[in-house]
Amino acid sequence: MQHDDTKSQGLLRLLTQGLLTHAEQKTANELGDRSQYIGMSDIGKGMECMRAAVANKLGLAIFPAISAVGELAPKDLAHTLGRQIILQRGHWQEHGIELALATTGVKLIPQLEIAIEHNSVPIKAHLDFTLVWGGKRPAVRILELKSNERIPDSLYASYETQLYGQVGLLKSCWTEPCFSVPETAAQSVTFPQAMQSIFGVAFPDSPDNVDIEAWVLSISLSEVRPFGPYLPEEGMLEVCLQTVVAIWRTAEDVRTGSLELNDLDYCRGFHPLCDWCDVNADCPKFQDVNLPFDSACGLELEELALLKERKAALEKRIVESEERIRQTYRLVGGQNWLSAGDRRFRVANIAGRKTLDRSQVLDTLTSLIGDELKAQKALEQCEKLGKPHERLYVSKINKPLKSAA
């Protein structure tokens, strides 16, 4: 069958327009005008990079206009569509998780809103899911969903800050009329009033005897891992509130011209989320020498980036293929080699690697020596430092998108 590139591109443009329109409408319906308040994700971003947080608050991030999608060059169209698929995948997963939790009968509120002012700065927290249990041992669980290509070993600091802000506000504002449940009559009420109105569940006037925790559910295409619990901490909430004021006032200074965006503090050193930053094109962190794109080095760099993308895709396919073959081996009850065509395969159990638990070694040495400082020194004397080596970092520059004309 002959492939029609023109029609294929038309279909991709239609899908891209739909995704951008849906994202815009969903944000407006659920989060409102985000330029008019500081949200929990803003706080997390501001803790790591004030420049990025302020740029987003001022609307300086690079997003293609929906009406301009028809003019995008094929490469930029593919980039925009791929980015939207990744960004909106979390919303699709959120809808599925909501349906799954609802079938269990748990009392669940999606997108509970907490709206307050602190030092004349408007703040809003939108909680992905709030689960509640009444009775003699009342409990509240906040669930924040994060969609990840791969499940991280530990959470980014920005994610943890977001959780501390949410759970801290829930407890500190418990009796304040600042809670709203979307599409219900429970608007600008206290938390106990909201729960009584929605579920008929009575909560105490004070949160002190309520079991309150926040959790992150990190979700990939085939795995879910919870991180937590995060508990209300006055100190962490105060840090969050200080960051709120800093972002708001700094954004005003940039808006009035008192400060330039590049005067602001930014994320130092390597950070995996810098490639995703929409204002990284002229970030001071990447003070670089510009080489012509069509130079030998520029072309080589572009080819290297493409090869690395293909390598990542191949590695993912290899993992998936290996898992399917392992599953086949288990299903046929394989005990030895199995043959298929010109190949044979088997699944073998391999002993785990032996490693030293540094903290346990230190505790053991301390108990034997009787002196923690001497034990620490002895351990350091046994450590071996590897040779320095070079590492190449290739980072994506998020430039304004070009038209196909």
Image: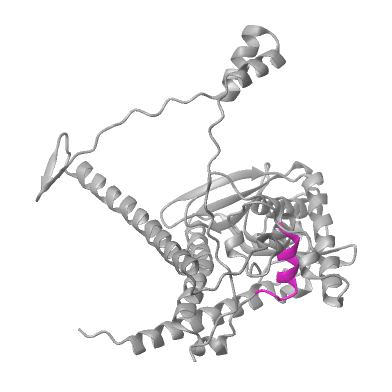
Residue located 72% across and 73% down the image: 34
Asked whether 75 falls inside the magenta stretch, the response is no
Identify the image quadrant of residue 173.
Answer: bottom right
Magenta residues span: 49-61
Question: In the rendered image, is residue 174 in sight?
Answer: no
Residue 101, above or below 78:
above
Q: Main secondary structure of the magenta part?
A: helix
Residue located 33% across and 86% down the image: 5
- x and y percentages locating residue 179 in the rendered image: 75, 63
Residue 14, above or below 219:
below
Does residue 116 appear left or right of residue 219 in this picture?
Answer: right
Does residue 323 appear left or right of residue 144 in this picture?
Answer: left
Question: In the rendered image, is residue 200 in sight?
Answer: yes
Residue located 30% across and 48% down the image: 323
Q: Looking at the image, which residue sits at the far right? A: 119
- x and y percentages locating residue 264 in the rendered image: 79, 63
Q: Looking at the image, which residue sits at the far left? A: 341
The chosen color scheme is one colour
Given residues 312 and 331, the one toward you in this image is 312
Does residue 108 appear left or right of residue 256 in this picture?
Answer: left
Q: Looking at the image, which residue sits at the far front? A: 296
Residue located 56% across and 86% down the image: 66
Does residue 356 appear left or right of residue 329 in this picture?
Answer: right
Quadrant location of the N terminus in the rendered image: bottom left
- x and y percentages locating residue 143 in the rendered image: 60, 54
Q: In the rendered picture of this protein, how many numbered marks are placed on residues?
A: 0
- x and y percentages locating residue 127 in the rendered image: 66, 60
Residue 357, above or below 250:
above
